[in-house]
Image (cartoon, grey):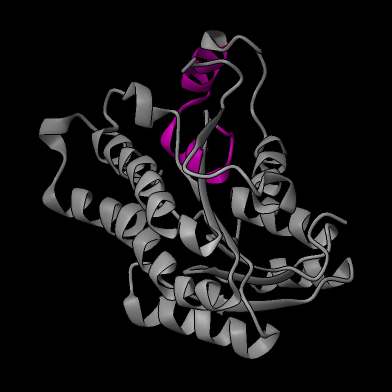
Amino acid sequence: MRLENKVAIITGSARGMGRVFALRFAKEGAKLTICDVLDCAPVAEEIKAIGGEVLALKTDVASEKDTAEMAKKTVERFGRIDILVNNAAVIGGKDFVKPVEQLTAADWDRTLAVNVKGLFLCCKAVIPYMKKQGKGKIVNIASTVAFTGAPAFLHYSTSKGGVVTMTRGLARELGEFNINVNAVAPGVVKTEAVRAALSEEDLKQIVETQLIKRNIKPEDIAGVVLFLASDEADVITGQTLAANAGEYLR
């Protein structure tokens, strides 16, 4: 198993990609802290059912208090933190997609609070433990729209551009401590949140822009995240790996 006895925190893991990441990590032997503003208990039960060890927390990644508690409780339970997957993000929901002139300051602030500030706070919380251990892996979930932009998605695409930039900055700062920081930039993954933001016709049109013409599933992204979190990626840092079925080439 590729993550045997590793301790991983996965944010935004009550549903969607985060849930799939958590189950894949558990199958690979990781001990898990799963956290979300939503109830993680059902996912925790799924992990226990396949023999995994799991701690489920209610965590708002935009709260410095919550993220500090997330790291502290993980170490109290498992003794260390080997991996952080920053998956929690705001996307979707009623009226999320809107032209720039219709975006409100509240729309902007909430999106960047979770997608950028939340990532920063989670990293800030776990980095002291990783430094003390002399090793760690941080995997940030970005998006193809960080490179392409997207109509009516300015707040989201801006936030994901911030994820890419923060990944590079953290990698430069943390390399001397043997902490790898990378990002995965998925294309459009057909999760609950994406279906709430985009119509079926929108999703079909996006598939037509891809070189590989099929929907991208959370399981497709889980394998990429697993690789970057594993010892196989020990000499990879500061990189953003696009997993987008060839929608955009960079």
Q: Is residue 174 above or below residue 235?
A: below
Residue positioned 61% across, 48% down in the render: 17
Q: Point out residue 118 in the picture as x, y percentages from the top left corner.
A: 36, 62
Q: Is residue 153 left or right of residue 49?
A: left
Q: Is residue 90 above or below residue 55?
A: above
* Residue 90 visible: no
Q: Quadrant of residue 40?
A: bottom right
Nearer to us in this view, 214 or 127? 127
Q: Which residues are magenta?
A: 189-207
* Residue 204 visible: yes
Nearer to us in this view, 109 or 104? 109
Q: Quadrant of residue 29?
A: bottom right
Label the magenta part by its dominant secondary structure: helix
Which residue is situated farthest in the bottom direction here? 76
Q: Is residue 131 above or below residue 116?
A: below
Q: Is residue 153 left or right of residue 8?
A: left
Residue positioned 66% across, 74% down in the render: 41
Q: Is residue 184 left or right of residue 103?
A: right
Q: Quadrant of residue 148?
A: top left
- Specify whether residue 55 is painted magenta: no
Residue positioned 32% across, 35% down in the render: 157
Q: Point out residue 147 in the picture as x, y percentages from the top left corner.
A: 36, 25
Give the quarter of the figure containing the N terminus.
bottom right
Nearer to us in this view, 88 or 234? 234
Q: Point out residue 161 in the picture as x, y percentages from the top left corner.
A: 32, 38
- Specify whether residue 195 is painted magenta: yes
Q: Is residue 230 above or below residue 220?
A: below
Nearer to us in this view, 230 or 38? 230
Q: Point out residue 189 in the picture as x, y percentages from the top left corner.
A: 57, 34
Residue positioned 72% across, 71% down in the render: 44
In the rendered picture of this protein, how many numbered marks are placed on residues?
0
